[in-house]
Image (cartoon, rainbow, N blue to C red):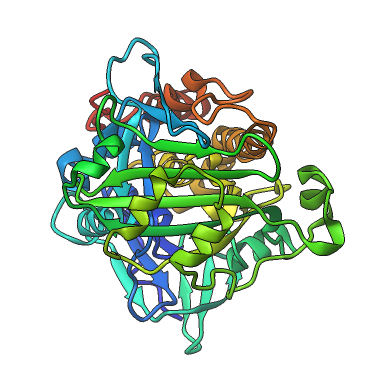
Amino acid sequence: MTSDNASSPGTLRVSIVGGGIAGLSAGLALRRNGHRVQIFEASEVKTEIGAALNVPQNALRVLDHFGIPRESLKGVPFYGGVSIDVDTGESTINRFPAVNGLERSVGLFCHRADLYEELRRVATGEGKGPPVKLRLGAKVTACDPDNGTITLNNGEVVQADLVLGADGGHNSLVRTHIVGEAQKITYSGVSCFRAVFEFPERPELRWLTEEVTGPRTFASKEGPFRLLLIYPCRDGKLLNFVGFYDDPLQDVKGKPLEYLVSKKFLTMTADWSPKATRDDIRAKFQGFHSKFLSVLDLPDHSEILKWRLGVLPLLPTWIRGRAALIGDSAHAALPFLAQGAAMAIEDAGAIECLFPAGTRPKDVPERLKAYQDLRKERGEFVNTGSVDQLKHLQSGGAFGRVHSVGLARLYGYDTIKTARQCYEERFGHKFPANFIHSRL
């Protein structure tokens, strides 16, 4: 059995299963407090490829606190969006209101790889606390939450004071051991095409950037749900393209979304994102105004994939013994609130606040209870809100308007402030004097 050195006073040994955005965020958060962190990633070469994502205000607050320069994310700020009529091609500009009096963009559109590489740099490079040890090709085959051990495919057993499951929404091994049974992502009845194109300056593409910075959307007015979402990323050099469409299963066609989710039709598997072509997109969005077709003439930056979209059922618990779930393994949601990566980053910010320097191994179970009390409600709020938002869009609701979920509650949330207050109230003493609060 290995332990990555015995704990020194006030320093925890931490094992994180999964080296994606959630795992790296939590790793860099805990190293800042002096804890010794190992991340176990099954892939031999871990990279984040493919599509762009939204890094909204609530996540940027946490990244600011972590000391990650916004410029390093190469993001494109957005202040609203433009809805384009699928019949006429005419545009309607929608500007987002200020949230909590903050006159700034709602967030940044970033390429996933840019966010991932910056998190990895800060987690494993020079900086405050011992660098995170990222172990690639280390597949975890078992987890004992009560004793804080994980077992690798080479037979190695690793002992830790804290285990975090960041092994994703699909088939999370840590989740199975914490909950006691497998919990599967379930099909939503909607699929999407995802692609990233090179984005050179061309007169016929000015409609993608002029007026207000933000996404361009085309939404069907009648018939099956179809929605195109297009926006720039990586300092405006790339263009992210997403095409959502109803894709019901033959044997449950016509059933409402909540029925599909509750009955767990079509559990996703590893081969759920087959390749697609530009002709597939043209065929699926036939009848939409031809304005968007110019995007499909752009050079490829990545291959076109087709994804089935699903949501994780609400879990009875996120914690057990010395182990907890973070990111998608705890609360994987549909993408229609664009908060997936943000929730993982928020989880990491809360973990940092609840496990400051000086935390003892015997403190871990109580700190995890505080983590669950702090984060589970918010994770489930976004999870269920994403389902509601899809239903809102399928019924003809506007893309830029968040249905049943207030913008202030999404974007105005301050994870660091809230977690700090929780720490002080639950554990009866002031936050460490060397704690640096976020700039926001």
Asked whether 161 or 183 is in front, the reply is 183
- Asked whether, in this view, residue 397 is left or right of residue 29, the answer is right
- Identify which residue, 403 or 296, lies in the foreground: 296
Residue pictured at 45% horizontal, 37% vertical? 217
Q: Is residue 233 left or right of residue 330?
A: left
Closer to the camera, 352 or 185?
Answer: 185
Q: Quadrant of the C terminus?
A: top left
Residue 294, percent from left and from top: 34, 51
Res. 348 visible in picture: no
- 338 vs 139: above or below: above
Which x, y percent locates residue 74?
Answer: 20, 46
Please report the residue visible at 59 percent of the width from the left and 46 percent of the height from the top: 333
Horizontally, residue 258 falls left or right of residue 68, namely right
Image x and y of residue 410, in percent: 49, 27
Which residue reaches farthest top?
Answer: 101
How many badges with numbers are in the image?
0
296 or 417: which is nearer to us? 296
